[in-house]
Image (cartoon, helix red, strand yellow):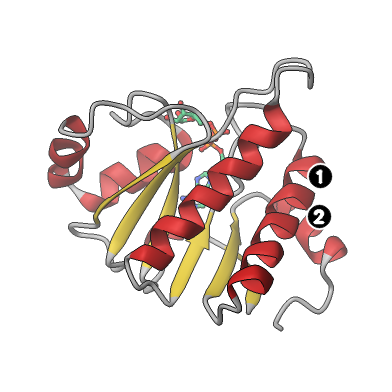
Amino acid sequence: MRKTIKGDITTLHVDAIVNAANNSLLGGGGVDGAIHRAAGSGLLDECKELGGCPTGEARITKAYNLPSKFVIHAVGPVWQNGNSNEEELLRLAYKNSLELAQKNNCKSIAFPNISTGAYNFPKRDAAEIAIQTCQQFLDEQNSDMLIIFVCFDEINYMIYKELCPNFNS
Ligand code: AR6
């Protein structure tokens, strides 16, 4: 099942929230900064042990002071010109996050709109990739995982509502 909400991902009581991280996994601005602030310094300490993460991949940690059980740190691509494999790398960031969630028995996962802030990926294209990749995962795995798309900015929220008006099933 999938659903779209508008809000702050750090407040959600789900099994896993996904972070739009960078290759260092050592924090940054945007949703990454919000997650590290809300989780507390234990999260950064655990991230330091991971030794970074290539673009398109994901890593899982505990969630410390956050209400979720896990944080999945996914690294989306920086948008360059559209000819640098950005679409495939964004698809992989979603797919690898879902696979990690499944391996850790997560029944619910919340995604921010990866790469659509500082990394400048066109929002509508990113939403289409996110929705398609998640639906394909649910279908292929015959999974009943709850996938929540958390939109923080109004533009992304309008795009998701338009692409999936009946998004609660
Ligand atoms: N909850 C949910 N979504 C949020 C929140 C929040 N609290 N805060 C921002 N967003 P960005 P990127 C949305 O820039 O483009 C960081 O510095 C925001 O509106 O966080 O993948 C990292 O360290 C946008 O739609 O991530 C990397 O260096 C979405 O989150 C770099 O930014 C993603 O915006 C990653 O860039």
**Residue 11 visible from this viewpoint:** no
> Could you tell whether 18 is left or right of 117 in the image?
left
Quadrant location of residue 164? bottom right
Whether residues under marks 2 and 1 lie with C-beta atoms below 8 angstroms apart, the answer is: yes
Q: Which residue is mark 1?
A: 124
Q: Crowding near pointer 1: few (<14 within 10 Å), some, many (20+)?
A: some
The vertical placement of 69 against 144, above or below, is: above
Horizontal and vertical percent position of residue 38: 27, 51
**The C terminus, quarter of image:** bottom right
The answer to whether residue 115 is left or right of residue 87 is left
Q: Whole-percent x and y of residue 18? A: 44, 52
Q: Label 2: state its secondary structure.
A: helix
Q: Nearer the viewer, residue 105 or 75?
A: 105
Instruction: Check disc 1 and give the amino acid type.
Output: Arg
Q: Residue at x 71, y 18 (%)?
A: 84
Say what amino acid the circle numbered 2 marks.
Answer: Ile
Residue at x 58% of width, y 42% of height? 92
Q: Residue at x 15, y 33 (%)?
A: 49
Sequence-earlier tag: 2 or 1: 1
Read off the residue under disc 2.
159
Q: Is 111 left or right of 10, judged from the image as shown?
A: right
Q: CA distance from mark 2 to mark 1?
A: 6 Å
Q: Residue at x 81, y 55 (%)?
A: 159
* Quadrant position of the N terminus in the picture: bottom right
Q: Nearer the viewer, residue 11 or 3?
A: 3
Residue 124 in view of the camera: yes
Q: Image quadrant of residue 54? A: top left
